[in-house]
Structure formats: structure tokens, C-alpha cells
Amino acid sequence: MAEIQGGGGDGGKKGGKVRSKKTSTRIDMTPMVDLAFLLLTFFVLTSTLSKPQTMEITLPEKPKEGDKQPEVNEKKVLTLVLGANDKVYWYVGITEPRAEKTDFSKDGIRKVLLEKKATIRDLIVLIKAMDDSKYKNMVDILDEMTISNVQRFAIVDITSADKDIVKEAKGS
Amino acid sequence: MSKVKMHRSTPSIDMTPMVDLAFLLVTFFMLTATATPDEPVQVSIPSSVSQMPIPERDMIVITISKDDKVFFTVDGTFTRAKMLDEMGKLYNVSFSEDEKQIFSVLTSFGLPIQQLKQFLQLDREDRKGVTQGGIPVDSLNNQLKDWVLQARLANPKVRIAIKGDGDSGYPVLKKVMNTLTDRKVNRFNLITGDEQLPSEVKAAAAAAKKPA
């Protein structure tokens, strides 16, 4: 059992007195150790290891009346439409676009983004989320922007034209 | 004689170092542990590669639950009490000092302000049983807008974070984001879980850093 070795300084003394002192300093530490480990186990199990992180996003200010919207070359615009069931539809340009369907896997939208980033200079990505897409999809696509290092992207409201394009792509 | 002596000395082990270590660890875990407040809803947050830690103080957290309800919280008892007071004036609901006291130590809530008084009058245990319907964020009745405004007036340093369940729908997020941008809050955080950067991206980033 646990004990504290007492009487370190009584080297020179001998006799009955010293002996009785020696035994009195022994403390049974077992209950204390039990308690210590109980508390230890409790705190180890309850402590959360991974703290959640944050992702900072900055939205553009709401345009005031009379503000001129910047014009961009449509060839540089890549539109991503987030659809239902974790699917992404993408197309380049605005005139007669043909949407293609892909997903959030490594060979899905990331490949498209990297490819377009390599071929198009000053690529602008527009992210449009359909009403039946999930919050998760939005976080994922913002993540892909970080991973593929796309500098210019914007979250834009979806238009009915986009919905038609997606509908077409869904059928094919 | 010698046999007897040996028996006496063997079964004692010195536990002191072990106890020292055990208490050191206990102290460490006790000090690092933070009590998690009980939230009205459980959300499973999506993961992202972002590595930015959450500030621990001065945070508004807007929680979006799985069934698209919106909850709101801000830290700081003083901020909360002041915010509730102002909100009461705005919506003609008067809160007593007791109710303000209770509100200031609560966590997230998701009730229209008209039901909040009744909720605060409940017992602690009863309060847990209440299913909260979420704060109205419609364009006609947008109370979230006022909560955000009053919280920012009460504590100007406050930052805003959205903690959404991965399966909550996009329309709610859009409503919340519109509410914030209407109030000229264009910069806010999305709370996400931890995720490792894909290895090939990491390697590319390291390579890009080297020459610079």
C-alpha cells in the first residue's frame, strides 16, 4: 500500500520513540488515488477534443439605387448551380449555355474548377443555390473555392433562366 | 528470523509519484474543460478546410436547425439583459427584473418575442421540455433583424456567426443572410467542423510558399 517515508532526519537516533514516529507517518493513499483517477477519467471523457472552426465570408453590400453594376466578359464567367441531392450543375458564359451535371467528390466539381482556372484568365465564379439545396452544399462549394484557390466568386440569387438550364441538364 | 523480516517489507509500493501525476492531469483537464451549455437543438455542423478558430467572446450565434428553425444567442449577461429590455420596448412586451435575470443566463432561444415572456416564467426543468418554434425571419415579421440590431447596440464589439445544420435548407440561410446584409453586416462567420486539406492541395500550397 501507499506510504510516505517519514523520519528522514532521524538517522542518528535509536530506540522505541523513533519507531513509533515512523509508523504514525504512514498514510493509506488508496482512497485518494481512487478519487484522483475517477476525476481524471471523468474530465478526460467529457473534454471535447476538436473545437469547431469558422469560415469567414464577406458578402457584397446591397447595391443602392443608381449604382452601376460592374460588367464582366461572359466568357470568363463560370456559373455553378447547386441543386437537390448534392448535385452541382455548371456552365460557362451566358449565351446558349449547356449545363453539365457533377457532384461534390474529388473528381467532380474540383476537377472542373481547376481545369477552368487553368484555361480561363481572371475566372469569375458565380454560385447560385437552388431552393432545394442544403446548407452543407453551400459550405462545401465555398470550401472548394478555397481549395482550388479561386479568388473571385460571388453568391448570387438564382434566376428562372438558370432553372430552365438546369432542368435541361437534369433530363440528359 | 530473516524470513519474517522479508515478508514485512515487500508489499508496500510508493504511490506518491503516481498520485502526483494523476492530480496534475486532473488539474489540467479541469482547467481546460469548459461547460457546454445545453442548447435547445442539436445541430450537426458540416466540415470545412477552414482553420480559423472561433473567438470565444462577443459572439452572436444564429443557429439554424435541421427543420429550418432559427435560434439566436449572444454572450454576456449585461448585453443580454440590455438587449431584452430594448426588444421589449420595441414590441410592447414588458419584462420584469426577474425575467431579465433569467434571460441573461440562458443560451439559445428560438421563440417569437410574444411567447418569450411566458417561456421565461416557466421552471427550469419545464423550459427544457418546450419545443421552440424558431424566431420569425419572414419579410413581413422579421424579429431576427431587431435582435441582431439590439445586440449590436448593446455590445458594439460583437461578431456574428451562423451555425447551421448540414441538412438545413438553403432558403433559410438565404433569409438569414439577407437579414444581415440588410443591416449592413456583410462580414460574418459560418461555424464548421474540422477537415483536413486534401494532400495534393497541401503540397501545392507548401511549394508555392517556398520561393517567397
Image (spheres, rainbow, N blue to C red):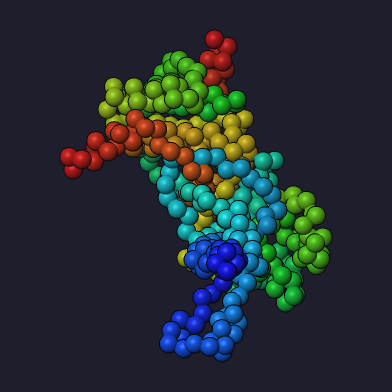
Give percent across and percent down for residue B122. 81, 65
Quadrant of the image containing the N terminus of chain B: bottom right
Give percent across and percent down for residue B182. 53, 51
Is there any visible trace of residue A76 in the rendered image?
no
Give percent across and percent down for residue A155. 47, 37
Residue B109 vs residue A99: left or right? right
Which residue reaches farthest top? A172
- In this view, the residue in front, A93 or B164, is B164
Point 55% across, 36% down: residue: A136
Which residue reaches farthest left? B211
Tell me if residue A54 comes above or below residue B211 in the rendering: below
Point 60% across, 26% down: residue: A84
Is there any visible trace of residue A70 in the rendered image?
yes
Quadrant of the image containing the C terminus of chain B: top left
Where on the picture, by quarter, is residue A90? top left
- In this view, the residue in front, A12 or B53, is A12
Point 65% across, 52% down: residue: B71
Give percent across and percent down for residue B44. 61, 42
- In this view, the residue in front, A43 or A71, is A43
Total labels: the figure holds: 0
Residue A28 vs residue A72: left or right? right
Point 42% across, 33% down: residue: A144
